[in-house]
Image (cartoon, rainbow, N blue to C red):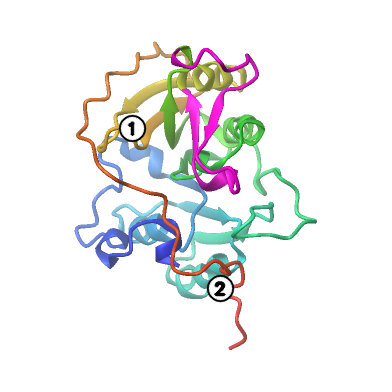
Amino acid sequence: MRELVGPTDLVAFDNPTHALVYSYLEPKLYEKVFDFGCGCGRVARQLILQNPRPKLYVGVDLHAGMIRWCQRNLQPAAPSVSFLHHDVFFERFNPNPNSPSVAKFPVGDSQFTLVNALSVFTHLKEEQAVHYLRECARILTAEGVLHASWFFFDKREFPMLHPEDNALYVSYLHPGAAVIFDRNWVRATARQAGLKIGGIVPPQIRGHQWIVMMTKQQVDEPEFPPDTAPYGVAAAPAGARWDVSDMGLEPE
């Protein structure tokens, strides 16, 4: 499962110092956390060990086996933690043709101080990104923050793109493998959803994932700084198997 979601070293799943998982976020934001795309619980495990632990944590993922693993192995360790299957179609992880391409989050309005979405928008098609920016805005409190990672490009450098084309897809066969968005489109679409960019963390590898913080508050939006990170390779995690949708659902 770790091979499918990113880092495989258990150190990346640990928090032995009980520190805030993201040191640049205010401590009060960790009170109620919604983890969009929780996978096999990397951030959940860190938050369970964090001091203070969130009063409420809800993790959702479209991979049913990872959710079951988290329910059985992490949920018993913390009564404030729960995991739910977000049953939407994804060719590799949830290939049920009857599942919709998007769905409403199974939680109430204005419920969470922090929505975490790492390596999620980097796999969504353009119309899906619109839907989920609206959903993130819906479930955030008035002072809450969406903490999400994105791949960005500057559409002005691609004059062949139509006005309705704001995303680039690295795989012809599997568009969700990695999706790169025009950063001005993301800013404008977030505003339409009721969100404004409040903070930006540049990538550590040139052209890789930017961290963007969005909020419902009226803030002065910063400009994107230059990407001065060193060049490197950080291909999307794939794992050794293609038939992974049933992983974690095997009979005991």
Using the image, determine if residue 36 lies above or below residue 168.
below
Q: Amino acid at mark 2?
A: Met
Image quarter of the N terminus: bottom left
Residue 20 horizontal/vertical position (percent): 28, 47
Q: Residue at x 69, y 52 (%)?
A: 89
Query: In this orientation, which residue lies closer to the viewer: 172 or 247?
Result: 172
Image quarter of the C terminus: bottom right
Query: In this orientation, which residue lies closer to the viewer: 80 or 118?
Result: 118
Q: Earlier in the sequence, mark 1 or mark 2?
A: 1
Q: Residue furthest right?
A: 98
Residue of label 1: 207
Using the image, determine if residue 77 lies above or below residue 136.
below
Q: Amino acid at mark 1?
A: Gly
Is 162 covered by the magenta stretch? yes
Write down the region rendered in magenta. Answer: 157-182
Residue of label 2: 247
Secondary element type, mark 1: loop
Residue 212 horizontal/vertical position (percent): 40, 30
